[in-house]
Amino acid sequence: MIDILNIVAALLTIAFGAFGFAAPKFTAGVLDLAPTGSNMGLSEMRASVGGLFVMLGLACLWLGSPMAYSMMGFAYAGAAAGRGLSLVLDKPPFAKAMVYFCIEAALAVWLIFANL
């Protein structure tokens, strides 16, 4: 069961990243990030929201080790920590940010504790 849930988490990570990688304008819109004055924001979407997560998920599937999946969990823990801090300091739209926080936190908890 752990292996199946790990694979599902990796596939979700790839899917999340694929949007940022292949459709940065769409992803920027969903995340309320409008490009202003330059296309650097689109470049950042493809890199940090896209390619990073696609490769993270693919590496986990390729390596298939518990340590790889736990490292993906630590990446999600970092994202959840940043999102949590943003909820306190930046006051983004609460419901939307909370949904993302819960997804990131749930993946972090599962991947770290199921694989270490």
Image: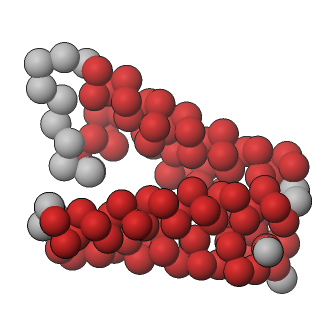
Task: Pinpoint residue 112: horizontal percent, then vertical percent.
Answer: 68, 73
Task: Pinpoint residue 59: horizontal percent, then vertical percent.
Answer: 76, 45
Foreground: 39 or 115? 115
Quadrant into which the C terminus falls: bottom right
Residue at 27% x, 41% y: name it.
28
User: Can residue 90 be spotted in the picture?
Assistant: yes
Render colour scheme: secondary structure
Q: Would you say 50 lies left or right of 12 here? A: left
Q: Would you say 111 lies left or right of 84 here? A: right
- Identity of the residue furthest to the top in this view: 38
Residue 42 sits above or below residue 74 on the image: above
Q: Would you say 1 lies left or right of 53 here? A: right
Residue 33 sits above or below residue 13 on the image: above
Task: Pinpoint residue 8: horizontal percent, then vertical percent.
Answer: 69, 66
Q: How many labels does the image show?
A: 0
Quadrant into which the N terminus falls: bottom right
Residue at 84% x, 66% y: name it.
66
User: Can residue 12 be spotted in the picture?
Assistant: no
Residue at 37% x, 71% y: name it.
101
Foreground: 69 or 58? 69
Q: Quadrant of residue 35?
A: top left
